[in-house]
Image: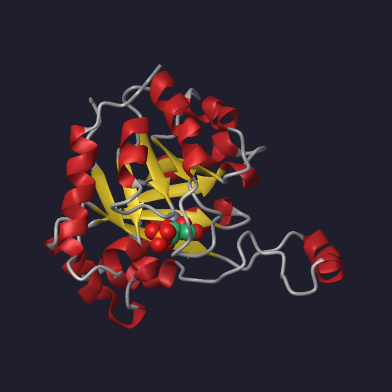
Amino acid sequence: MAVSPKIAPSMLSSDFANLAAEAKRMIDLGANWLHMDIMDCTKPLACFILTPLLFPLQDGHFVPNLTIGAPVIKSLRKHTNAYLDCHLMVTNPMDYVEGMAKAGASGFTFHVEVAKENWQELVEKIKSSGMRPGVALKPGTPVEEVYPLVEGKTPVEMVLVMTVEPGFGGQKFMPNMMDKVRALRHKYPTLDIEVDGGLGPSTIDAAAAAGANCIVAGSSVFGAPEPGDVISLLRATVEKAQPIIN
Ligand code: DX5
Ligand code: ZN
């Protein structure tokens, strides 16, 4: 295949109290990128009113979790030159572009669900800030919604297909998301296509055969006795795959 494998351990599964050491360990073990999950607590106004009424146990965030932000990226950047593949699970990605760029993010992947109106402006801002733009889609979002962004005047350079509901590591891979990956690979033979959620030795065959080349893996890497073996296996499987693109 024309695209190269990028194995991206998800630092969400690392020991956050030792982030610099964990990052170095992953790169030393052969990781290409470090996947950084940024989740926020920005809410649309309606959520303040409706969410407590409709979902008393939820808070209306883009995802029901809170992780790291630009200050942590900035601190980590002082310890590594690695490509920081930042996945923004936030309600207002535009608000984060400048801060993430200054902090040293390499890739900035936003969710299409929250950028329907302003994606073109957002992509341009990400690019002009010196980061690589990507777009992510949740399991319930049809793949067609990202086509205009890949074909835009200033296009995104990666599509991230979520293979779990965003929010947490350690969830079960959704094999039916491979239809989206196949459709993207068929349409865009040289596009970087990333899969995120539940990837590991038992699911990589399906993802690689469908055409994914950027592989995020959190619990399967950090939970393994030999994380380097998992990274090598993921890469070898992507390298060998002959994507089914019909
Ligand atoms: C989930 C995150 C993922 C997560 C993946 O919202 O986007 O990056 O860390 O973790 P695993 O590989 O454990 O499913
Ligand atoms: Zn992620």
Instruction: Please tell me which residue lies in front, 20 or 94.
Output: 20
Relative depth, front residue between 239 and 95: 239
List x then y, in percent, for residue 233. Answer: 19, 50
Asked if 177 appears above or below 200 in the picture, the reply is: above
Front-lying residue, 137 or 94: 137
- Residue placed at 35% from the left, 56% from the top? 105
* 182 relative to 127, above or below: above
Q: Residue at x 46, y 70 (%)?
A: 68
Q: Quadrant of the N terminus?
A: top left
Residue 120's place in the image compared with 138, above or below, is above
Q: Quadrant of the C terminus?
A: top left
Query: Is 10 placed above or below 120 here?
Result: below
In this rendering, would 5 be left or right of 149? Answer: left
The residue that appears at 41% across and 40% down in the rendered structure is 127
Q: Where does the image place residue 145, in percent across and percent down from the top left?
A: 60, 31
Outermost residue toward the front in this view: 202
